[in-house]
Amino acid sequence: PVFGGIFVTYWTWQWIFFINIPIGLMVVILAWCFIPADERKIIVGGEKMDFVGLLFLAMALLLAMYSGTIISNNVAGGKYYLFTFLLISSILFFALFYRHIKRVPSPFIQARFISGAGFGTVNILNIAYSGMVIGALSLVPLYAIKRYGISEINSGTLLVTQGVASVIMSTIMSINLRRTGYRLPLYIGCSLTALGVFLLTFHPPSFILPFWWLSLSTLLIGFGFGFMSPAARNAGIHLEPHQSANIAAIRSLGLQLGNIFSVAIATTIITISSNETFAQSMVYLALSVILFMLLPTISKVPENRGSW
C-alpha cells in the first residue's frame, strides 16, 4: 500500500504492477540458494499424483477470481450473466473437487482436512478472520480517499500500522503459545479484529482526525491478527503433525477464498450503490457482525498447552 500510494501520487497506477518484478526475482534467487533439495521418495502401493483433483481445484479458484474481477469492473455494464455463469461454474468445480477427494484412494487433499473434526472449525476461522478481513482491509485506502478525502500517499500508509502490529504480536504469541494454548489467543485476537472492523464503520469523534481514526482501527486489526495467527495456524497442524504441508496448503486456500469472496461482494455493493462511501461503511458493519457472531465457534477448536 505504501509503494502503491507513492506510485499513484508521483507516477501512474500502471507502475504498481512492476513492484512484483524485483521482489519476485529476489524470492526466486533466495529460494534457489537456501531451500534444500527434496529427498527422493519411493512411492509404494502404486500411489500417483491426483491431477484430476488438482485440475478441479485450479478451475474453481480461477473461475472464482475471474468472476470477482468481472463483477467489480462491469457491474455498470450489466454483465451479470457472465458473473453468474462464472460463479456457478466455480461452485460446481468446488463441488466436483470435494466429491472427488472423498472417493479416490490418494486424493490431492484429504477431505477430513477440510471438514473433519476440529479442522472444519479452524478452516472457518481462517476464512473469516484472516481471508475475509484481509480482503476488506485492501479496500481501506479507497475508503480513506472517498470518504475522508485523504491523499493517495497518506491512505497507502494506513496499513503500515496494521502490518507492524501484526508482526510484533505474532512474534510474541508464537513464543508464548505453549503457555496460552489456542483458545485464549483466538478469543482475544478475533475480538480485536472484529472490533477494528466495526470501528471502520463510523465517522471519528470531532477531536480525532480521520487519518488517526482509521489508523487506530487498522492497528486493532493488526493486533488481532498477531494474537490469533500463531494459534490459528498451529491448531490445525497439531491435529495431524505429519500432514503439516497439506494443512498449511488448506489454510492458504481458505485465506484466498475468504479474500476473493469479501472483495467481490464489497466491490459489487459499492459499485451499484448511489452512495459509495455509505455502502462501504455498511460492508464493514456487516462483516464485523459476522465476525462477532462467529466468536462462539472458537470453543470447538481443539485445545493444547505445554509440550507438543
Image: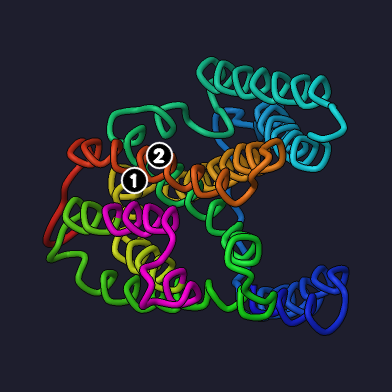
Q: Is residue 39 visible?
A: no
Q: Position of residue 150 (x, y in %)?
A: 62, 74
Q: Main secondary structure of the magenta part?
A: helix
Vertical placement of residue 10 versus 159, above or below: below
Contact (Cβ within 8 Å) of mark 2 with mark 1: yes
Q: In the drawing, what numbered circle is on residue 123?
A: 2
Horizontal placement of 7 versus 284: left or right? right
Reply yes or no: does residue 165 show up in magenta: no
Nearest the camera: 243 or 147? Answer: 147
Q: Position of residue 34 (x, y in %)?
A: 61, 79
Residue stretch in magenta: 190-214
**Amino acid type of the residue tagged 1 in the rendering:** Gly
**Amino acid type of the residue tagged 2 in the rendering:** Asn
Horizontal placement of 109 versus 125: left or right? right
SS assignment at label 1: helix
Reply yes or no: does residue 204 show up in magenta: yes
- The quadrant the C terminus occupies is bottom left
Place residue 162 in its image quadrant: bottom left
- For marks 2 and 1, the one nearer the N-term is 2
Q: Position of residue 223 (x, y in %)?
A: 33, 68
Horizontal placement of 212 versus 178: left or right? right
**Figure colour scheme:** rainbow
